[in-house]
Image: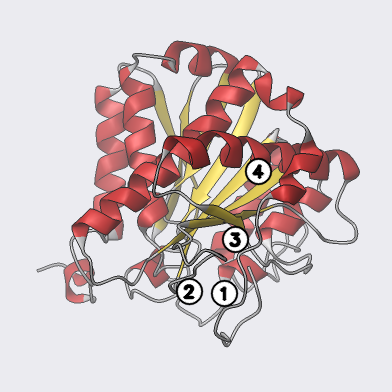
Amino acid sequence: MSAEDELPRENSRWYTHDEVMERLDRLERTGRGTVSLEEIGESIEGRELVVATVGSGETDVFITTEQHGDEPTGTSTIFQILQRLSAGGQNTAQIREALTIHVLPMHNPDGGMRNQRVNADGVDPNRQHHYDPGSDDNPSPETQAMIDYVTDLDPEWVADLHTQTGDYVDDDGESIRASNFWPIAPDADEDAIELSKQMNWAIYDEVNDQYGFANISQYPGGTGANIARNAYGIRGYGSVLLEMTGQVDDRGERMEGMMIRHMRAEVETLLEETADGSLYDRDSELAETIPERGPRSPWPWDNE
């Protein structure tokens, strides 16, 4: 039994870090040259942080998952998307020709191996994105690796995949399955905010109608410049937070499958509309019409 296997795992939907590395290696081996890997840093406990890249387009986009180690749905989702993009098929050629997609799965591997939100030092990686590139002071080396990579990349947009705990309902008593948001920091770049709102509206307009169980809302996010969604908006990139509801749910694999399908549809909408340019025709102000999620029980941390 390896040291990885000795750490707690809630159920089969949780990848170990070793399994994440194995899946990335397999994608690189079987992707017929479509997937490349780059180690960009390591966690406090020395686990590799690896970015997978697919596509050869002039427009770079960046996606990260599992900043919070107890939110693995985004990691499961992004592997399905990478598999589809590497295999080719319907719509993938245009995406790969127009975009270069950079993915950092399991941003917080030490937390992931403990099924906990924070990293090995008890620091929330999603509260450390305000540090300058190259900083030696960031208490989350995982986040600093992302800052350094993303700012060097200068992407069109950044997507941050999470899951939210709780059972939220709308005014009609229907369960809210996802909550997304854009940068609202006072110093966020105006053009970045507009693009971010276009991203949010594209997701709502496309996915909410496609899936009967979708029911997307606005996430009640804060204004802190340390939060990824805001920090990359300040740096001038489109930025979107994707939160799926139900990370703690006793309905098991069926619920997990629904979450993955929904989150996959959201991410693929962004990729497809960025690739064909239709994203830029979206009316950004319509994002304000997305229903608000509503109240939640207090958490011991700030909003995402």
Q: Is residue 133 visible?
A: no
Indicate which disc, 2 or 4, sits on the residue closer to the N terminus. Answer: 2
What is the secondary structure assignment of the residue under circle 4?
helix
What is the secondary structure assignment of the residue under circle 3?
helix
69 sits left or right of 207 in the view:
left
Q: Nearer the viewer, mark 4 or mark 3?
A: 4
Q: Depth check: give the residue in front, 245 or 119.
A: 245
Q: Give me the residue at 39% from left, 20% from top.
A: 34
Q: How crowded is the residue under tag 3: few (<14 C-alpha within 10 Å), some, or many (20+)?
A: many
Q: Mark 1 to mark 4: distance in Å?
A: 25 Å
Indicate which disc, 1 or 3, sits on the residue closer to the N terminus. Answer: 1
Query: Which label sits on residue 119?
Result: 2
User: What's under tag 2, amino acid-wise?
Assistant: Asn
Q: Mark 1 to mark 3: distance in Å?
A: 9 Å
Q: Position of residue 208 (x, y in %)?
A: 51, 42
| Residue pointed to by mark 4 | 200
Q: Position of residue 258 (x, y in %)?
A: 31, 49
Q: Nearer the viewer, mark 1 or mark 4?
A: 4
